[in-house]
């Protein structure tokens, strides 16, 4: 086991980041937008998750700077932390776009992409917990692969959504708004893939 225990300070901090990401993704998926006034609440809550994530990143950077020895390479701890934070930042940005454009009815493409991203966030949390608690790092690989599969599904949905948007939407303002949201969601899925790649790098270095 690369971490001495789940109580290792870096194990705890990585877990805090992954749990916060998972909870923010769950909130994003489950929150019901009934009218425009709900958008402000939605965006503010996502902003709270993002600020909480930033505090965790600040904490882990401080501890990395003070630590003489780390359970895995400090660059890998930082990369894993930052890549998870990028996913959360993307979700927060997406909630801000919904509020800015007063969109309360997400279309099927948005719903499916967000669902895949939420599933990826859960896979990330499982993988991080395995990283800090198992001797068999190879068991993390299946979760990294699943994250990449979900990213591929989001890629396909992104292409379909853009094709559909340009085919049926006649309002140029709406085209701009929806295009930005689709691209934002696809970018979040890409960030999830970066997390998966980082996990695989850690497995390779420490197996």
Image (cartoon, rainbow, N blue to C red):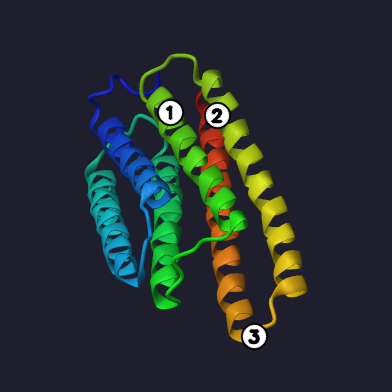
Q: Secondary structure at mark 3?
A: helix
Circle nearer the viewer, 3 or 1? 3
Identify which residue, 23 or 13, lies in the foreground.
23
Structural crowding at the residue carrying mark 2, measured as other residues with C-alpha within 10 Å and reported as few (<14), some (14–19) or many (≥20): many
Residue displayed at 29% across by 35% down: 10
Marks 2 and 1 in Cβ contact (< 8 Å): yes
Structural crowding at the residue carrying mark 3, measured as other residues with C-alpha within 10 Å and reported as few (<14), some (14–19) or many (≥20): few
Query: Is residue 102 toward the left or the right of residue 117 in the image?
Result: left
Q: CA distance from mark 3 to mark 1?
A: 42 Å
Image quadrant where one finds the N terminus: top left
Would you name the residue on which mark 1 appears? 126
Residue 135 at x, y = what percent?
44, 14
Identify which residue, 189 or 166, lies in the foreground.
166
Query: Is residue 69 toward the left or the right of residue 79 in the image?
Result: left
Q: Earlier in the sequence, mark 3 or mark 1?
A: 1
Q: CA distance from mark 2 to mark 1?
A: 8 Å
Q: Secondary structure at mark 1?
A: helix
């Amino acid at each position: 086991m690369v971490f001495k225990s789940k109580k290792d300070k870096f194990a705890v901090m990585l877990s805090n980041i992954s749990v916060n990401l998972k909870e923010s993704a769950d909130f994003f998926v489950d929150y019901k937008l009934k009218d425009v006034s709900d958008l402000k609440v939605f965006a503010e809550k996502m902003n709270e998750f993002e600020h909480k994530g930033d505090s965790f990143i600040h904490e882990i950077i401080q501890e990395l700077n003070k630590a003489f020895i780390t359970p895995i390479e400090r660059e890998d701890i930082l990369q894993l932390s930052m890549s998870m934070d990028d996913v959360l930042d993307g979700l927060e940005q997406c909630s801000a776009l919904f509020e800015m454009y007063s969109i309360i009815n997400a279309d099927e493409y948005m719903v499916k992409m967000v669902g895949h991203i939420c599933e990826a966030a859960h896979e990330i949390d499982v993988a991080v917990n395995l990283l800090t608690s198992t001797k068999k790092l190879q068991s993390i690989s299946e979760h990294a692969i699943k994250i990449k599969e979900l990213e591929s599904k989001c890629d396909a949905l992104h292409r379909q959504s853009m094709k559909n948007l340009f085919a049926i939407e006649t309002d140029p303002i709406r085209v701009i708004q929806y295009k930005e949201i689709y691209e934002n969601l696809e970018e979040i899925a890409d960030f999830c893939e970066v997390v998966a790649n980082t996990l695989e790098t850690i497995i390779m270095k420490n197996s």
